[in-house]
Amino acid sequence: MSTDQPDEKTLKSISPTRLAEEVRRLSAMRKNGELDATGFDQRFARMVGELRDRRIDGGREEIAKALEPLRTEGLLRPEEWFRLEKQLGLS
Protein backbone atom coordinates (compact mmCIF):
# COMPACT_ATOMS: atom_id res chain seq x y z
CA MET A 1 0.00 0.00 0.00
CA SER A 2 1.40 3.39 -1.00
CA THR A 3 0.92 6.50 1.12
CA ASP A 4 1.79 10.13 0.57
CA GLN A 5 3.26 10.45 4.07
CA PRO A 6 6.60 8.82 4.84
CA ASP A 7 6.64 6.13 7.49
CA GLU A 8 7.33 7.65 10.91
CA LYS A 9 10.30 5.31 11.30
CA THR A 10 11.94 6.64 8.12
CA LEU A 11 11.90 10.27 9.23
CA LYS A 12 15.23 11.33 10.64
CA SER A 13 15.13 13.11 13.97
CA ILE A 14 16.46 16.64 14.15
CA SER A 15 18.68 18.34 16.67
CA PRO A 16 17.51 21.26 18.82
CA THR A 17 20.25 23.33 17.18
CA ARG A 18 18.88 22.54 13.72
CA LEU A 19 15.40 23.60 14.82
CA ALA A 20 16.75 26.86 16.20
CA GLU A 21 18.65 27.49 12.94
CA GLU A 22 15.46 27.00 10.92
CA VAL A 23 13.53 29.44 13.11
CA ARG A 24 16.40 31.95 12.80
CA ARG A 25 16.29 31.58 9.01
CA LEU A 26 12.54 32.20 8.90
CA SER A 27 12.90 35.21 11.20
CA ALA A 28 15.68 36.64 9.02
CA MET A 29 13.51 36.19 5.92
CA ARG A 30 10.70 38.10 7.65
CA LYS A 31 13.07 40.85 8.80
CA ASN A 32 14.63 41.21 5.31
CA GLY A 33 11.23 41.46 3.67
CA GLU A 34 11.50 38.10 1.89
CA LEU A 35 8.41 36.94 3.79
CA ASP A 36 5.45 39.05 4.74
CA ALA A 37 3.54 38.31 7.96
CA THR A 38 1.24 35.83 6.22
CA GLY A 39 4.12 34.00 4.53
CA PHE A 40 6.00 33.77 7.80
CA ASP A 41 2.92 32.46 9.61
CA GLN A 42 2.35 29.83 6.93
CA ARG A 43 5.94 28.59 6.99
CA PHE A 44 6.06 28.70 10.77
CA ALA A 45 2.82 26.68 10.97
CA ARG A 46 4.19 24.14 8.49
CA MET A 47 7.41 23.82 10.47
CA VAL A 48 5.53 23.31 13.74
CA GLY A 49 3.26 20.76 12.06
CA GLU A 50 6.23 18.83 10.71
CA LEU A 51 7.63 18.59 14.22
CA ARG A 52 4.71 16.31 15.05
CA ASP A 53 6.02 13.84 12.48
CA ARG A 54 9.63 14.02 13.58
CA ARG A 55 11.49 13.46 16.78
CA ILE A 56 13.77 16.09 18.24
CA ASP A 57 16.98 14.71 19.70
CA GLY A 58 17.65 15.60 23.30
CA GLY A 59 15.61 16.21 26.38
CA ARG A 60 13.47 19.15 27.38
CA GLU A 61 16.36 21.00 28.99
CA GLU A 62 18.55 20.73 25.89
CA ILE A 63 15.71 21.78 23.58
CA ALA A 64 14.78 24.74 25.80
CA LYS A 65 18.44 25.82 26.00
CA ALA A 66 18.79 25.82 22.20
CA LEU A 67 15.55 27.74 21.67
CA GLU A 68 15.75 30.27 24.51
CA PRO A 69 17.97 32.75 22.58
CA LEU A 70 15.21 33.00 19.96
CA ARG A 71 12.92 34.43 22.62
CA THR A 72 15.45 36.62 24.41
CA GLU A 73 16.80 38.09 21.14
CA GLY A 74 13.27 38.89 19.99
CA LEU A 75 13.44 36.62 16.95
CA LEU A 76 10.09 35.12 17.92
CA ARG A 77 7.12 37.16 18.96
CA PRO A 78 5.51 36.12 22.27
CA GLU A 79 2.64 34.32 20.52
CA GLU A 80 5.10 32.44 18.28
CA TRP A 81 7.23 31.47 21.26
CA PHE A 82 4.14 30.24 23.13
CA ARG A 83 3.01 28.21 20.14
CA LEU A 84 6.42 26.58 19.65
CA GLU A 85 6.84 25.92 23.35
CA LYS A 86 3.36 24.38 23.58
CA GLN A 87 3.81 22.18 20.49
CA LEU A 88 7.12 20.87 21.83
CA GLY A 89 5.65 20.20 25.28
CA LEU A 90 8.07 22.56 26.99
CA SER A 91 5.42 24.53 28.84
Image (spheres, rainbow, N blue to C red):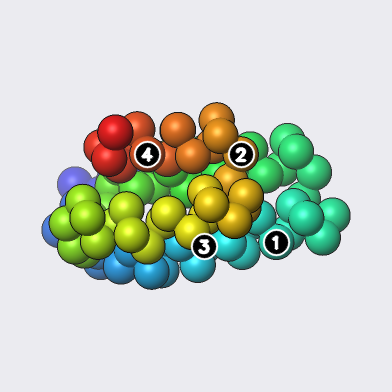
Query: Can you give x and y, in whole percent of width and height, for residue 84 in the image?
Result: 42, 40
Query: Can you give x and y, in whole percent of width and height, for residue 69 in the image?
Result: 49, 59
Mark 1 and mark 2: span between their CA atoms? 13 Å
For label 3, count other residues whose C-alpha is less than 10 Å away and answer few (under 14), some (14-19) or many (20+).
some
Viewer-proximal residue among 88 and 66: 66
Viewer-proximal residue among 39 and 26: 26
Q: Residue at x 29, y 33 (%)?
A: 91
Q: Please give the residue where the numbered disc 3 appears in the rendered image.
A: 22
Judged left or right of residue 9, residue 14 is: right
Q: Quadrant of residue 39?
A: top right
Q: Please give the residue where the numbered disc 2 appears in the rendered image.
A: 77
Mark 4 and mark 1: span between their CA atoms? 20 Å
- Marks 4 and 1, the one that precedes in the sequence: 1
Q: Please give the residue where the numbered disc 4 appears in the rendered image.
A: 85
Q: Please give the residue where the numbered disc 1 appears in the rendered image.
A: 28
Q: Secondary structure at mark 3?
A: helix
Judged left or right of residue 31, residue 59 is: left
- Marks 1 and 2, the one that precedes in the sequence: 1
Query: Can you give x and y, in whole percent of width and height, for residue 47 in the image?
Result: 47, 48
Mark 2 and mark 3: span between their CA atoms? 15 Å
- Marks 1 and 3, the one that precedes in the sequence: 3
Please state which amino acid type lies under the numbered disc 4: Glu
Q: Secondary structure at mark 1?
A: helix
Viewer-proximal residue among 30 and 72: 72
Mark 4 and mark 2: span between their CA atoms? 12 Å
Please state which amino acid type lies under the numbered disc 3: Glu
- Marks 2 and 3, the one that precedes in the sequence: 3
Q: Quadrant of residue 27?
A: bottom right
Identify whether 48 is placed above or below 78. Answer: below
Q: Which mark is residue 59?
A: none
